[in-house]
Image (cartoon, helix red, strand yellow):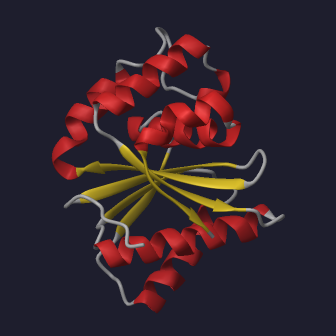
Amino acid sequence: MTLELPKQAQLFVDECKAKDYYLAAAVATSASLTAVRTELRSGRHKGTDYVHFVRERDAVKDRFINIMQECGLIAIMYVSSAKKHAVAREACLHSMLEDISAQKVRQLTIESDASIDAADRRIIAKKLLELRYDDLRYEHRGKKEEPLLWASDAIAWCYNRGGAWRQKIEPLLAEVRGC
C-alpha cells in the first residue's frame, strides 16, 4: 500500500523501546506548524516545560490526545521486533527514509539523544545517498524545544502500552509499518 502524506508534510520522530521497538512519526504540514505548536503547548500540565507521556497523569494524557486529534495530526508508526535496539532503529529509520523519499518530504526532526545522534546522522546520510534523495533537511532537537516531539512521544507510548491507550490514538495512525 502506498502511503499518502499531505503536501508540505514535515515529520517529527520519537521512539519507544519498552517491548518491541517503535518509531513514531507525527506528521504536520508547514502551513499548520504555528497553530499546532500553540495547541500542543496548551496541553502541558502547569509548571512543566514539555509533555512526556511516561510520567503524565491519565487526565493530562487524555487531554493531550484530544488536542492532537483536534489539530488533525496524523502519524506513521514504524515497528521492529529486532532484539537489539540499534538494529531495530536502523531498520525503522530506513523504512521511514524510503517513505520520506517517495513522498518528497523536505523536513525531518528527531528527538535528540546524545548517545545515538551521531549514529543516526551516519545512517540517514548513507540511506539518503542510496535513495538519491538530497532534498531532506533533518535535525535532532530536544523535547523542550519542539512540541511536535511531544506528539510523537505520546503516540509511541500509547501504541506500546496497547489496550485502551492504543485505541485512543488509532484514529491518528495513517499507517503502521513493519521494519
In the rendered view, tell whether residue 162 sits above or below residue 3: above
Name the quadrant containing residue 33. top left
Residue at coordinates 59% horizontally, 43% vertically from top-left?
156
**Image location of residue 36, percent across then percent down:** 27, 34
x, y percent for residue 6: 24, 58
- The residue lying toward the viewer, choosing from 93 and 113, is 93
The percent coordinates of residue 96 (x first, y second) are 49, 68
Query: From this viewpoint, which residue is outermost toward the top?
Result: 46
Looking at the image, which residue is at 59% across and 37% down? 166
- Residue at 44 percent of width and 82 percent of height: 128
Q: Is residue 120 left or right of residue 21?
A: left
Residue 106 appears left or right of 140 = left
Nearest to the observer: residue 47 or residue 5? 5
| Extreme-right residue of the structure | 83
- Answer whether residue 76 is visible to the viewer in this image: yes
Residue pictured at 49% horizontal, 12% vertical = 45
| Quarter placement of the C terminus | bottom right
- Residue 78 is left or right of residue 16, and the answer is left
Residue 110 vs 92, above or below: the answer is above
Give the x, y percent position of residue 159: 61, 42
